Image (cartoon, rainbow, N blue to C red):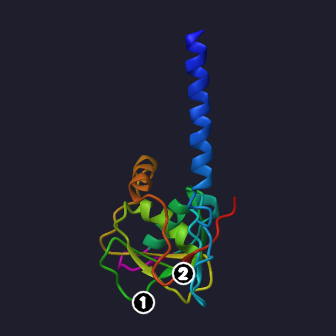
Amino acid sequence: MRALVVVGLLAVLAMVFVVVALVRDTQSNAGGAKGCPEGWPLADVTLRERKDVKINVLNGTDQPGLARQVADEFTNRQFQVKKVAGEKNPIENIAVLRYGPKGVGSAHLLRAYFLDHAKLVFQIERKDDTVDVVLGGAFQQLATTTEVNQSLGDLGSPEAPPGTCPAPVDQ
């Protein structure tokens, strides 16, 4: 009989805590663009699936055929490769990711394929959701699936770049 009284009392206390937590919830306005300054673009911070990511692969090295080779690897990994071309300016880094507000979530995923060693170039005026992947002289290979998953865990969630606001997330 005592056990039933104790369990009942614990259930009542649990309900009180839940009600207090819901009433005092300060995140009821989180996740939207409600506090966004006028004219700031909305950044799509949704982490995209590979099949939804559109990329242009550009060769910033003097190694012929590198962009095509890496584009084929991305295609095999279910990315949408839109364009394969050369880059006018040579790149010394492993890679450079150029993207706009609509490509924030896609660029975040691509960072993991370079183990977060790609240079990020956010272009606030860019209107499309395509990410330019510019391969540099230090590039050797894309990360394995296991390495990508570990890197994504280390990176955390995508964040809106400075000068933008996170777009409301569809639920």
Residue 130 screen position, x and y as percent = 59, 76
Amino acid on which the number 2 mark rests in the picture: Gly
- State which quarter of the image contains the N terminus: top right
Report the side of 147 relative to 109 (left or right): left
Name the residue at 30% across, 78% down. 92
* Foreground pick, 89 / 41: 41
- Label 1 or label 2, whichever lies nearer to me, is 2
Residue that sits furthest to the top in the current view:
1
Q: Is residue 154 above or below residue 160?
A: above
Q: Which residue is mark 2?
A: 100
Query: How many neighbours does mark 1 have within 10 angstroms: few (below 14), some (14-19), or many (20 or more)?
Result: few
Q: Which residue is mark 1?
A: 88
* Foreground pick, 23 / 77: 23
| Magenta stretch encompasses residue 61 | yes
Residue 83 visible, this angle: no
What span is in magenta? 57-64
Dot 1 or dot 2, earlier in sequence: 1
